[in-house]
Amino acid sequence: TFVFFIGISHAGTLISAILRVSHAGWRTPVTRMAEFITVVALVCGALFVIIDLGRPDRVLNVIIYGRWQSPIIWDVLAITTYITASVAYLFLPMIPDLALFRDRLGGRVSAWKSWLYDVLSVRWQGNASQWRSLGAAIGVAMILIIPIAVSVHTVVSWIFAMTLRVPWNSTIFGAFFVAGAIFSGVATLILIMAVLRKVYHLEEYITEKHFIYLGYLLAAFALIMIYGNVSEFLTTGYKLEEGEEFHFRQLFLGQFAGFYWFYMLGGLVLPGLLLLLPWTRNFWGVIAAAVLVDLAMWVERYFIVVTGLRVPLMPYEPSTYAPTWVEWSVMAAGFALFALLITVFVKVFPILAVWEIAEDHKNAEFSPEGARLPPGAAPQPAGGGSR
């Protein structure tokens, strides 16, 4: 579950940064949602590191007594850096919108929200100097966030790849994990966009076109994942070194065969077909593909961990494993926290980049001389009404 949360965090800053760098014209309604998904997913993923220790009171020992040669320490540093960079990347483009909320919603929301908008808007007035500084800061952030995001999931993969266990001892684990992270991240972004679009009636801004374009991206990574799986199993299976035969047998024919074939056929091949065939390449086809991808990618993380630990290192019968109700409960609590944090965010902060949409549509007076919307066009809080 930790690897899954870190993976879907790539839905945000990495995809958003790539869309900004490439100047994709359709990106505007997508980027803000993608960016806050990253921050929420990273918070949930980082908490699972503490939970997995079993003794949260000893978490500081990892920092105080950890060995810098350990991939676990690399992971802690990478995730901490990524969280910091992602919060900054989410906050910078939100400043003009927070100033707009401060000016237009000050008397219509609760006192603590007014105070929050006032503090976070950092005295934004929308003058030419501020717009130049903001543009430069966003430009630097979107360039830096791409290598940071790629390095994070590469380092996560090294927790496995730096060991001598047969299925994990692979030089392509880093690239494989990054591709899988973007794959599951895009699927999660699609599903959350669909939910928010329905709940907050954002059909005017988030259209079927946005889902189709993200579907193309999902289909591309489905093909990359199929290629990666075939390449890995062909090269390792051809040599069939010690332990590989056991690993392949438990995946293809053994107790994990159901998981594996659901992942390959239901999570890679079927979504690819849904997204590439013209008669299923629509809103509901993209949603169905995203659901299958997210389920399959969680299953993939499950059998990567469990099947790898089952490969025997000594001439004894391999052990068996089944999650207990406590483990299922912790996992459910993690997903519940993820949903709760997203709900809290959309109740407080703007889920669409108001100033970017106004700029794109050319129907608002958003100029370097002042970030102001026309009279009567005051934005509403994401949840509607004052709180």
Image (spheres, helix red, strand yellow):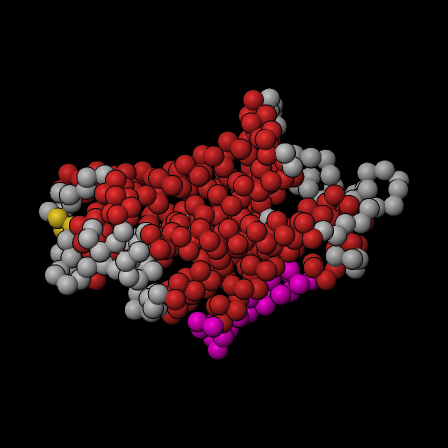
Quarter occupied by residue 89:
top left
At 19% from the left and 53% from the top, the residue drawn is: 107
Q: Position of residue 96 (x, y in %)?
A: 22, 47
Q: Position of residue 236 (x, y in %)?
A: 72, 47
Work out whether residue 219 or residue 117 is closer to the camera in this orientation and state it.
117
At 61% from the left and 43% from the top, the residue drawn is: 173
At 72% from the left and 48% from the top, the residue drawn is: 306
| 234 versus 191 height, above or below | above
Instruction: State the predominant SS element of the stretch in magenta.
Output: helix
| 366 versus 204 height, above or below | above
Q: Position of residue 295 (x, y in %)?
A: 59, 60
Q: Position of residue 245 (x, y in %)?
A: 80, 49
Do we see residue 146 in this rendering?
Answer: yes
Work out whether residue 136 or residue 339 is closer to the camera in this orientation and state it.
339
Work out whether residue 45 or residue 67 is closer to the camera in this orientation and state it.
45
170 in magenta = no
Tell me how many marks there are.
0
Residue 373 relative to residue 247: left or right: left
273 in magenta = yes
Work out whether residue 28 or residue 120 is closer to the camera in this orientation and state it.
120
At 65% from the left and 53% from the top, the residue drawn is: 328
Magenta-highlighted residues: 261-284
Quadrant of the rendering where the C terminus is positioned: bottom left
Quarter occupied by residue 208:
bottom left
Quarter occupied by residue 360:
bottom left
Residue 243 relative to residue 297: left or right: right
Do we see residue 29 in this rendering?
Answer: no
| 367 versus 360 height, above or below | above
